[in-house]
Amino acid sequence: MTDPEPLTGPPLPHPLTGALHVSPVPPGTGWPDDPADAATPVAHDADDVRSLARDADGLAALCGEVSVCRACPRLVAWREGVAVAKRRAYVAEPYWGRPIAGWGDERPSLLIVGLAPAVHGGNRTGRVFTGDRSGDWLFASLHRIGYASAPTSVHAGDGQRLIGARMVAAVRCAPPGNRPTIGERDTCAPWLLAELAFVADSLEVAVCLGSYGWEAAIRAFRAHGYAIPRPRPGFGHAAEAEVDRPGRKPLLLLGSYHPSQQNTFTRKLTEPMLDAVFERARRWTEESRG
């Protein structure tokens, strides 16, 4: 498949700034916290992703390159098609419609690893885990434990700030049915590997949301030369694994059920359960620094 021609919806007012934007949003046109501009290099295939990720000149440059990636034709067509068609509840606002870069503290002690942006959440708002009910649960918990400055995250540019934490997705585009292919996963993986390299010095804990985030984190840490325990640790809520690193205290890998509507409505995941995972992350970090 070749890179599809970009789709464009009519200009609509941003819900926070009121500025007019087409959907998807071209880089450098004033969207809040846009990490890219018109000169940011664009990856058009897996080789481009590997090259740009390897040679990125810092975390900010990497985020910009992630946010304009067009390497997976199916994902590009899906995210842009939804951005133009929109959900009825958001028909009067523009959609970001681009990949979602990692977001948060540039020197985090905590890394939160998820699957992919929500098609009407991050794909609409321009920030990971923002603008949907999963994000509502996640940010409320992070705020209660002290990792977020506010209990809600509604849109890029809303003033929310992560404190000692950073969020990433294993796959940076919203996939159809929330299911990327193995090829799409592998094409996107160098972005995560490069981001991990930029934050590794400060990192103490990784919280993995769902089995997909757990497996993505294990693959990324192994690729960086960290020693994954044997037998390979299995995912579960509140699962723990210590990942050895040369010359440093082990990194703690923590599992959590994903705060999806299915899990929260059925009470497979409750607020105290989610809080307990982030409280464990906080204790581990405090012990590391003590």
Image (tube, rainbow, N blue to C red):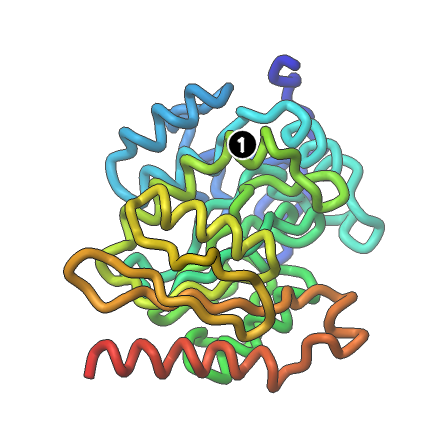
- Which quadrant of the view contains residue 249? bottom left
Q: Which residue is mark 1?
A: 26
State the residue in front, 279 or 25.
279
**Residue that lies at the very extreme toward the front in this rendered image:** 231
Which residue is at the front of the view, 262 or 29? 262
Q: Is residue 165 visible?
A: no
Total marks shown come to 1
The amino acid sitting under disc 1 is: Pro
Pinpoint residue 195: horizontal percent, then vertical percent.
35, 46
Left or right: where 136 falls relative to 226? right
Q: Residue at x 46, y 71 (%)?
A: 240
- The quarter in which the C terminus is drawn is bottom left
Rendered image quadrant of residue 40: top left
Pick the front one: 76 or 241: 241
Q: Is residue 169 above or below residue 142?
A: above
Q: Is residue 214 positioned above or below 49 on the image?
A: below
User: Up-down: is 9 above or below 19?
Assistant: above
- CA neighbours of label 1 inside 10 A, class few (<14), some (14 to 19), many (20+): many
Q: Residue at x 52, y 33 (%)?
A: 186
Where in the figure is residue 160, as x and y percent of width and height?
47, 67
Residue 129 shown left or right of residue 121 in the figure: left
* Image quarter of the N terminus: top right
Question: At which x and y percent is residue 202?
Answer: 25, 62
Q: Secondary structure at mark 1?
A: loop
Residue farthest to the left? 247
194 sits left or right of 188 in the view = left
| Residue at x-position 54% and y-position 82% | 275
